[in-house]
Image (cartoon, rainbow, N blue to C red):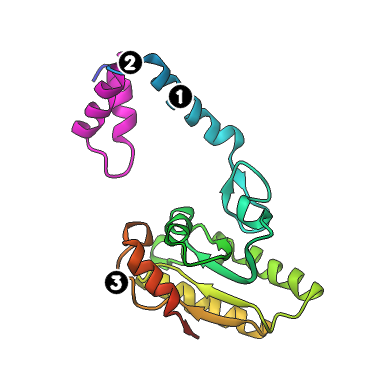
C-alpha cells in the first residue's frame, strides 16, 4: 500500500476504527470523494475539535466541550440520583431512553485483572470525592447511586466492588435489572430493554 496516496492513507485511517474492515473503509473513502468539499471539511473540522475542545467534566468525568457538562450544569436534573456507567456511549444509550432524569458518573472502563485494569485506573476516586463533597453540604441518606455497568463478568465485579465502597456513605445503592442481557453492551441494547433495566433496578 502506497501511504503517499491520499486515497490509500484515508482507507488505512478508516480501517483502524473498530469493526471497520478494508472494504468498508474504502466505501467511506469513495463516498467522501463523491461529495462536495464542504462535507469533507466539516468532517475534518469535527475531528480536529475532538482533541482541541473536548475535555473531562470535572464533576462526572463525562466527555464534553464545556465544564461542567450539560448534565451537571442543568438545574432540571435530579441531583439525588447518580447513575454510574462504564463509558460515554453507555451514558448516551441511557439518556436516549428518556426514563432517567438524574446525574451521571463515567468510570471510563471496568475493573479487569486480566487486562491489568484496577480501581486506580478508573474514575472511582472522583466518585468518592464527589459524594464526600455532597455529604458536607447535605445528607446522603436520600441519595441513590445506580450502578449501570454492563452485565458482563467485569461489569458485575466492578458493581460489587463499588457497592462495598459506597455503603459506608449511607447512600442507597442499586443495580440496573436484567432487562439488559448478560454479556451485552448498553450501547447495542434496544431502548426498551435499557428503560426496563432502569425501572426494575434492585438494591444491593
Magenta residue check for 93? no
SS for dot 2 = helix
194 horizontally vs 63: left or right: left
Instruction: Provide the major secondary structure of the magenta segment.
Output: helix
The residue where tag 1 is placed is: 42
Dot placed on the residue nearer the N-terminal end, 2 or 3: 2
Specify the segment rendered in magenta.
Answer: 4-33
Distance of label 3 from label 1 (alpha carbons)? 38 Å
150 horizontally vs 20: left or right: right
Q: Position of residue 57 (x, y in %)?
A: 64, 51
Dot placed on the residue nearer the N-terminal end, 2 or 1: 2
The residue where tag 2 is placed is: 6
Dot placed on the residue nearer the N-terminal end, 3 or 1: 1
Instruction: Point out the frontmost of discs 3 and 1.
Output: 1
Marks 2 and 1 close (CB-CB < 8 Å): no
How packed mark 3 is, by other alpha carbons closer than 10 Å (few <14, some 14-19, many 20 or more), is some
Amino acid at each position: 500500500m502506497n501511504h503517499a496516496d491520499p486515497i490509500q492513507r484515508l482507507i488505512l485511517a478508516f480501517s483502524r476504527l473498530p469493526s471497520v474492515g478494508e472494504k468498508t473503509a474504502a466505501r467511506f473513502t469513495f463516498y467522501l470523494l463523491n461529495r462536495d468539499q464542504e462535507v469533507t471539511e466539516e468532517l475534518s473540522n469535527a475531528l480536529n475539535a475532538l482533541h482541541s475542545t473536548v475535555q473531562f467534566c470535572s464533576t462526572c468525568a463525562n466527555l464534553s466541550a464545556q465544564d461542567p457538562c450539560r448534565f451537571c450544569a442543568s438545574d432540571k436534573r435530579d441531583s439525588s440520583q447518580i447513575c454510574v456507567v462504564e463509558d460515554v456511549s453507555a451514558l448516551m444509550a441511557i439518556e436516549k431512553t428518556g426514563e432517567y432524569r438524574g446525574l451521571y458518573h463515567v468510570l471510563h472502563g471496568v475493573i479487569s485483572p486480566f487486562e491489568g485494569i484496577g480501581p486506580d485506573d478508573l474514575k472511582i476516586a472522583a466518585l468518592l470525592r464527589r459524594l464526600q463533597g455532597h455529604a458536607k453540604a447535605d445528607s446522603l441518606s436520600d441519595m441513590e447511586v445506580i450502578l449501570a455497568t454492563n452485565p458482563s463478568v467485569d461489569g458485575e465485579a466492578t458493581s460489587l466492588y463499588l457497592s462495598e465502597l459506597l455503603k459506608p456513605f449511607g447512600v442507597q445503592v442499586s443495580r440496573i435489572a436484567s432487562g439488559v442481557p448478560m454479556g451485552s453492551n448498553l450501547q447495542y441494547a434496544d431502548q426498551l430493554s435499557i428503560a426496563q433495566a432502569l425501572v426494575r433496578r434492585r438494591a444491593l
